[in-house]
Image: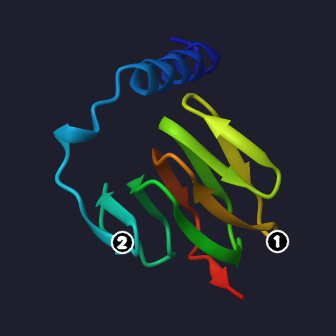
Amino acid sequence: MSDATDIQRRALDLLSMAAGFDAGAWSWQPFREGIEQVPLHEPAPSGLRAALLRYAPGASVPAHEHVGYEYILVLEGTQEDDRGRYPAGTLLVNPPGSGHAVRSAQGCVVLAIWERPVRFD
């Protein structure tokens, strides 16, 4: 299989995951007030982390700066920041040097991948 075909297959798998996601199938742990997590691996020495995050309705993360890339795939509900609202199926890429505050009025579940820890204001 070519690299391009493999990437397309993975992208389609992510869309299938978002369409059929079942948040109840996971064991959730506290992360921040109003937000629970399922870590997908131990944090790497470099700071790389991946986790499922479940926001309760009205939960938020205060303003922060991205030191490395952050990738967010919205699996369920809607996540919001200063730039817009992102429904299930949305893939967000926040590059190093970017910043925002995140919230979810109705609650949401996202797959979050951080290249490095974020820096809070």
**Which quadrant is home to the C terminus?**
bottom right
Q: Where is residue 102 in the image (x, y as percent from the top left)?
A: 64, 62
Looking at the rendered structure, which numbered label has been put on residue 31? 2
Q: Where is residue 112 in the image (x, y as percent from the top left)?
A: 50, 53
74 left or right of 26 in image: right
Q: How crowded is mark 1: few (under 14 residues within 10 Å), some or many (20 or more)?
A: few
Q: How crowded is mark 2: few (under 14 residues within 10 Å), some or many (20 or more)?
A: some
Contact between marks 1 and 2 (CB within 8 A): the answer is no
- Residue at which label 1 appears: 97
- Counting residues from the start of the chain, the first of labels 1 and 2 encountered is 2
Q: In terms of image quadrants, where is residue 20?
A: top left
Q: Which residue is drawn at 82% across and 51% down?
A: 83
Amino acid type at mark 2: Phe
The structure residue drawn at horizontal position 41% and vertical position 75%, both measured from the top left corner, is 32
From the viewer's perspective, tell me whether residue 119 is left or right of residue 108.
right
Q: Which amino acid does label 1 sit on?
A: Gly
Determine the residue positioned at 18% across, 38% down. Answer: 25
Calculate the distance from the C-alpha at mark 1 to the C-alpha at mark 2. Answer: 23 Å
Residue 10 got which mark?
A: none
Foreground: disc 1 or disc 2: 2
Residue 24 percent location from the top left of the image = 20, 40
State the residue at coordinates (64%, 18%): 4
Question: Image height check: is 25 above or below 53?
Answer: above
From the viewer's perspective, tell me whether residue 110 is left or right of residue 69: left
Identify the element where label 2 is drawn.
strand
Label 1: element kind: loop
The image shows residue 98, relative to residue 71, as above or below, that is below
Q: Is residue 58 or residue 18 the one in the foreground? A: 58
> Considering depth in this image, is 48 or 36 the residue closer to the camera?
36
Specify the color scheme: rainbow
Number of numbered callouts drawn:
2
